[in-house]
Amino acid sequence: MALPTVAFIGRPNVGKSTIFNRIAGDRISIVEDTPGVTRDRIYSHGEWLATKFAMIDTGGIQISDAPFATQIKSQAEIAIDEADVIVFIVSGKEGVTAEDEQVAKILYRSDKPVVLAVNKVDNPESREDIYEFYSLGFGDPMPISGVHGLGLGDLLDKVVEKFPKTDEKTDNDDIRFSIIGRPNVGKSSLVNAILGEDRVIVSDIAGTTRDAIDTRFEADGIKFTMVDTAGIRKRGKVYENTERYSVMRAMKAIDQSDVILFVMNAEEGIREQDKKVAGYAHEAGKAIITVVNKWDTLKKTNHTQQDFETLIRNEFQYMSYSPIIFVSAVTKQRIEKLPALIKQVYDNHEKRVQSSALNDVIMGAVAVHPTPTVNGKRLRIYYATQVVTGPPTFVVFVNNPDLMHFSYVRFLENQIRDNFDFTGTPIRIIKRSRK
């Protein structure tokens, strides 16, 4: 199921990015005391009381001729359309402004649930000043401080209450995969090539106006559901109000998928945006196949494929687990291998390792490469167990988690991969004190 989506909306310089960053747990948006710094939508995920959700930060809506004002307003309106719940942020220091009232009119037309948050209320004694915001017509204002984190729990309680009820569940056991990539890498052609005459189309499932289109088909006796997404555009260059699908829809498709086909263009090579696109899927913990499309267009030598693969490995070191396949949607080169490869990485993504076999590998690794000593204290590893699949996640119980450096975690991950086939899927290792 797609995660519910929260959009943070408001005029410039009311603290939207500060609040977004605090909920996301990282400094994702640029925070600067200058109106209009956040010009584009920023995407991340949040969680509150075991409820996960997607978040969109936006540039402030400006009803003026200021630079970028038109584009910022357009981006904010798209975010409003994508959102399930809108957090309308205003400033308690400045009170209700004419721009706040203009933003309110836009939100009235959206017909979306709105939670009104009065930011920059750093002193509890000044909370009586929020009552003027009742005039905006969105019910009880929520006093908060993004800088100090005051009131955010109450705000998120109210936001989660307004999420749409999702008792629906996917009614099939198909392997779901999404095709992602920046524009013009040939995703649509790849879809058509995969759905060739040798495939059995089960159904086309049209979603709402805000969803991609799911296509069910069968290949080699295996049932798949394919989600085609629009190209993920580079922020700040192309505004998606002219696109049928936005970046947020692609992220929703990733959230709903088991496997991701990350498509690149062989003609153009690797671009910086490719890394950002792949990063979305990697951070979501999905199984990933790297698909180099338009391979037929290159003039090749005996080393062309090996050199290209080496380049990919160097540029995408965090995705060393991802198999690489060179295809042509036009000539159908290697297209027939994709269903089996998707099934393979899916199986690895859902693989579970017996604790006895896992601990044999871990203890064997420790014997070959003893645990490090930090400030006279030696790391001791007691045992390990797999706690979840999709992606496979392992908990390693130790005497002191602080003694396990990330390089030793990486060493253990490599040992696990050397002994068990986890091709195509990230694996996660969590260190815990035995206590």
Image (tube, grey):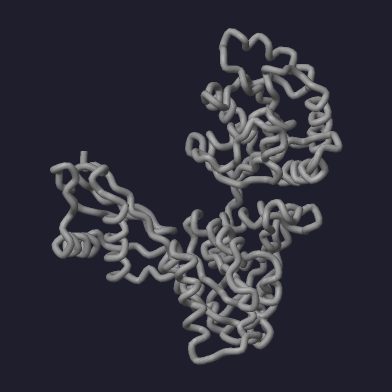
Counting every numbered tag in the picture gives: 0
Quarter the C terminus occupies? top left
Vertical side of 151 occupied by 324: above or below = below
The answer to which image quadrant residue 152 occupies is top right
Q: Position of residue 101 (x, y in %)?
A: 82, 25
Q: Residue at x 51, y 70 (%)?
A: 289
Percent x, y of residue 210: 73, 52
Relative image position of residue 407 (x, y in whole percent): 30, 56
Rendered position, 115 above or below 181: above
Q: Which of these two is toward me, 75 or 221? A: 75
| Viewer-closest of 319 and 289 | 319
Instruction: Tell me if residue 243 comes above or below residue 161 in the rendering.
Output: below
The correct choice, above or below, for 134 with respect to 385 in the image is: above
Left or right side of 201 for 151:
left
Image quadrant assignment for residue 424: bottom left
Q: From this viewpoint, which residue is outermost toward the bottom?
A: 302
Determine if residue 63 is in view.
yes
Residue depicted at x 33% and y 54%? 429
Q: Residue at x 23, y 45 (%)?
A: 403
Query: Residue 166, can we see it?
Result: no
Picture residue at 64% right of the left edge, 80% below the top: 294
Nearer to the camera, 186 or 54: 186
- Residue 242 locus on image (x, y percent): 81, 56
